[in-house]
Image (tube, grey):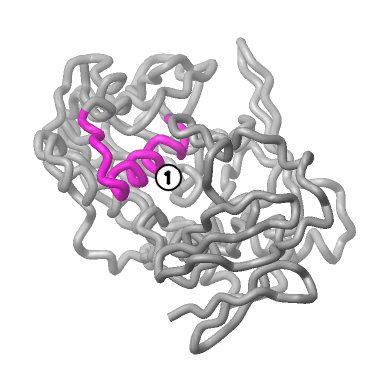
Amino acid sequence: MTHVTLDEESGGLKLQSDRTSIILHPLWVRERVSGPAIFDPISHQRLYEHAELPQDLRIYKIGDQNEESLKLEFSDGPILKLTLSEVLKEISWQENSESLPKPKSWTANLKDLPEFNWPDLYEANIFGKALDAYFTYGFCIFQNTPVETDSLKRLSRRFGYLRETNFGELFNVETKPNPSDLAYTDVALASHTDNPYRKPVPGIQFLHCLRNEVSGGLSTLVDGMAIAQALRKENAQQADILEKVDVRFRYEGPSAILEHHGPIIERDHDGIIRHIRLSSRLDYVPALDIETLTHFYAGRSRLHKMSNSEDFQISFPFRSGTLLMMDNYRLLHGRTAFNGAQGHRHLQGCYIDHDGPASLFRMLANGRNVTSVIRED
Ligand SMILES: [Fe+2]
């Protein structure tokens, strides 16, 4: 039960629960009330400029009140409705069904991989479970997807909008003569995150197996959150430096020269580790002092070793029709070696932004129909 009273000193509201209390600024409250001419009912945009509100605004009076809402009389005249449940969700006093599932860090002990049968995703509740697994573990594996060339365009569009790059809308990963990247050979690829040199860094990567006639070539994944947490446990000073130092990442190719800066480990506004930039062939740290760089290099080396160790890495085969969806900020990916002489191995890949699955999760949480959004045609 939340008790709401006026805070005489600030002109705002005082909210009190059994455990805690908070004073809400009158302008903060005013930006959350509803009423005529406050919000456009379709776009949900404010119909006024908040700069026009008096800076010395106060709440004069609390009028009709029930558990769900209360009427507030403001010093500039209007009487407006405040929905209490919305405020309690925003200040985290009440659970918010729109909140994305919290990530759970995992290591090589992760036994039940989040795996779904693609045709089942037409059921909204299964689609919701796949989204939940993606946010929790940072990846999802789908089996039995269509395998025509370029079908990844429509498969990935069920989750968001394609992010085209200088590699095209889709990129092909297959062995070929005179390869421009190690990905196009049959050698093992160490754990890495893709494209830290792009601004913004691509959010989600899809890898779709069209054909696989070779043994080996297993896909590997590592939870960047888990290795960053492990590094902090081992050596907090090294972890601090990897979070502070902005590294330059650079790509130079025939059609683009790309650069972007960022730390090796980055947290979000809630302090959760969200973004790992580990791309051992494209990173250039600034010429900092000897002591800082000694810790930086030791920490980066330790992180690289953990990202390729059996303690943290999981692996699984790509079969024809397997589709992997992974958070390119959180997870590192790679592959084991294979023998290209055994046959053809053809994957296609693409990127989408983080927004797509997050929007679909919120739509489902609000009971909205997502069928038209997630169709493949
Ligand atoms: Fe990659």
Report the number of numbered marks.
1
User: In percent of the image, x 23 and y 47: which residue is there?
Assistant: 128
Magenta-span inclusion, residue 358: yes
Quadrant of ligand 1 in image: top left
Amino acid tagged 1: Asp
Image side of residue 81 versus residue 198, left or right: left
Between residues 324 and 303, which one lies in front from this camera angle?
Answer: 324
Hey, which residue is sitting farthest bottom in the picture? 18
For disc 1, the marked residue is 327
Q: Which residues are magenta?
A: 352-371
Q: Is residue 45 left or right of residue 95?
A: right
The reply to whether residue 340 is visible in this rendering is no
Side (left or right) of 43 relative to 62: left
Who's the residue at 48% across and 72% down the image?
93
Q: Residue 152: which quarter of the image?
A: top left
Q: Quadrant of the C terminus?
A: top left
The secondary structure making up most of the magenta span is helix
The residue located at (37%, 65%) in the rendering is 106
